[in-house]
Image: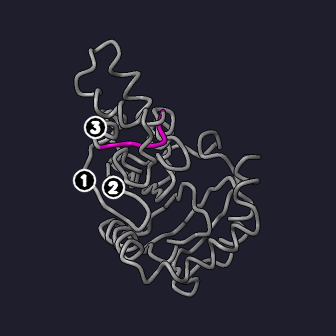
Amino acid sequence: MSSASTIYDPAYARRYRAHDDEFESSEPCRRFAGWLHQLCAAMTPPIDVLDLGCGTGRYFWALTGVRNLVGIDASPAMLAEARRPHNAELITARMVTLIEGDIASYPVDEGRFDLVYSIGVLAEHAPLDESIVARVARWLKPGGQFAFTTVHPDSPSIPLTLKRTLGRAIAPITPSPLAQPLRDRLLARGRYADERRVRELLEPRFVIDSLFRFESEAHLHCWCVARRGA
């Protein structure tokens, strides 16, 4: 919480919010927004939605058929900007609730949401690990969907240090007792996630409906949509 407050201070949040207006014209924004719109359109309204790491509320406008939209973020400065989000006039959610809290520990009612989504947060600014996946499974209604992006460990945005270059080279031939610790280091202990890691974390709690790579202006990502089991 204190770290997020320091990094995402009011000045940063204002710059980020100003970028929202420019970002809409970019291909990544159009694809992310279209992705969310399609997910909502395929569900029977009204639906209840949770945005994990909502920041300035960049994608609130892309959601449809929403009864309750909850956005949670650790930065009060980013949440202040989310009170006047991009395309505010297009937001159709009946109720929007903004919560300051840590997504890894903040209590949320079990079985409350039809959709939990997170864009540009998990396996990027916050670790994607067993704890987060278990929490999302509890928050979702049976059959509810979990949609998120990660930064792929092969993303060109990740500095290719000598240690990382060596680790990637020897990973395929590393003996089994040492393979997992090496892999954990290459994934920065949850700060990056590839397709294999996403499957390892989500199964068997979720059924993966789609999982593929996508390159944005900043990173090589994994995109995933999964359904919570009944």
Residue located at (63% from left, 39% from top)? 105
Q: Amino acid at mark 3?
A: Arg
Which of pointers 3 and 1 indicates the residue nearer the eye?
3
Q: Earlier in the sequence, mark 3 or mark 1?
A: 3
Q: Earlier in the sequence, mark 3 or mark 2?
A: 3
Which SS class for mark 1? strand
The dominant secondary structure in magenta is loop
User: In the image, 129: left or right of 211?
Assistant: right
Residue located at (32% from left, 20% from top)? 179
Residues under numbered marks 2 and 1 in contact, where contact means CB atoms less than 8 Å apart: yes
User: Which residues are the magenta region?
Assistant: 189-194
Residue located at (57% from left, 56% from top)? 53
Q: Disc 2 marks which residue? A: 223
Residue 38 position in % (x across, y down)? 32, 71
User: How many residues crowd around disc 3 within 10 Å: few (fewer than 14), some, or many (20 or more)?
Assistant: few
Which SS class for mark 3? helix
Q: CA distance from mark 2 to mark 1?
A: 8 Å
**139 versus 11 height, above or below:** above
User: In the image, 203: left or right of 63?
Assistant: left
Q: Disc 3 marks which residue? A: 196
**90 versus 186 height, above or below:** below
Which sits in the foreground, 165 or 55? Answer: 165
**80 versus 225 height, above or below:** below
Q: CA distance from mark 3 to mark 2?
A: 13 Å
Q: Disc 1 marks which residue? A: 210
Which SS class for mark 2? strand
